[in-house]
Amino acid sequence: ILNVEQSPQSLHVQEGDSTNFTCSFPSSNFYALHWYRWETAKSPEALFVMTLNGDEKKKGRISATLNTKEGYSYLYIKGSQPEDSATYLCAFETGANNLFFGTGTRLTVIP
Amino acid sequence: GAVVSQHPSRVICKSGTSVKIECRSLDFQATTMFWYRQFPKQSLMLMATSNEGSKATYEQGVEKDKFLINHASLTLSTLTVTSAHPEDSSFYICSASLGTGGYEQYFGPGTRLTVT
């Protein structure tokens, strides 16, 4: 079992604030790093799949960076909105779709 | 976007009975589907990889005779928990992928299983 850690475990921010969280993963046997957004009672939704060191991806107000050499990825949310409230999961892929998930960062955006 | 459904969303069964969970890709064909489970305060853990028309590949520590997986078509995979016990109570969730390696996975909404 590979160790994928996410921090913080939970986070409360005010509407309009920008925030970021971290995913740490092994620096060996890297194939891809996935980010998912999981709202309560819904299906996890894919945000990004990143494969190259230095990758930066953006979707609206959400962006992510990747450092495979040191084994971390950051997820950023600019101008948080209440609808951003969810658990954000990262998953480390070793290839062939084998994903090892972190326990997630639970974000609550306070109106 | 690709949609995956899962049924039932919640099931309560008695110890010793079997429960079947269905996972369907609604608008795409999935050659590979995945089954995960999540215990409270833990991460999603891959149980098995299900390939259409062939036997599933189980992760270490997952009993293949207890968790039967059938992937009979490109849009349907089923997980049957046989002779369920209270320790099998968990959240089970499936996903499907359009390809192998570096592809995003599309998840169902999950099934909460409670064994009494």
Image (tube, helix red, strand yellow):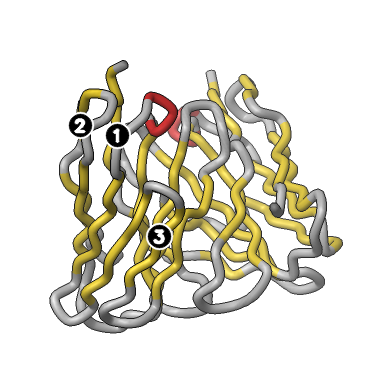
Report if residue B10 is visible in the image.
yes
Write down the residue under mark 1.
A106
Q: Secondary structure at mark 3?
A: strand
Q: Residue at x 20, y 38 (%)?
A: A9
Q: Residue at x 45, y 67 (%)?
A: A49
**How far separated are the C-alphas under marks 3 and 2?**
21 Å
Q: Are marks 1 and 2 in contact (CB under 8 Å)?
A: yes
Report if residue B66 is visible in the image.
no
The chain carrying label 1 is A
- As drawn, is A34 to the left or to the right of B18? left
Q: Are marks 3 and 1 in contact (CB under 8 Å)?
A: no
Earlier residue among tags 3 and 1:
3
- As drawn, is B99 to the left or to the right of B90? right
Three-letter amino acid code of the residue under disc 3: Lys
Earlier residue among tags 3 and 2:
2
Badge 2: few (under 14), some or many (20 or more) residues near its Cα, within 10 Å?
some
Same subunit, labels 3 and 2: the answer reads yes
Where on the picture, by quarter, is residue B76? bottom right
Earlier residue among tags 1 and 2:
2
Three-letter amino acid code of the residue under disc 1: Arg
Same subunit, labels 3 and 1: the answer reads yes
**How far separated are the C-alphas under marks 1 and 2?**
6 Å
- As drawn, is A84 to the left or to the right of B105? left
Write down the residue under mark 2.
A11
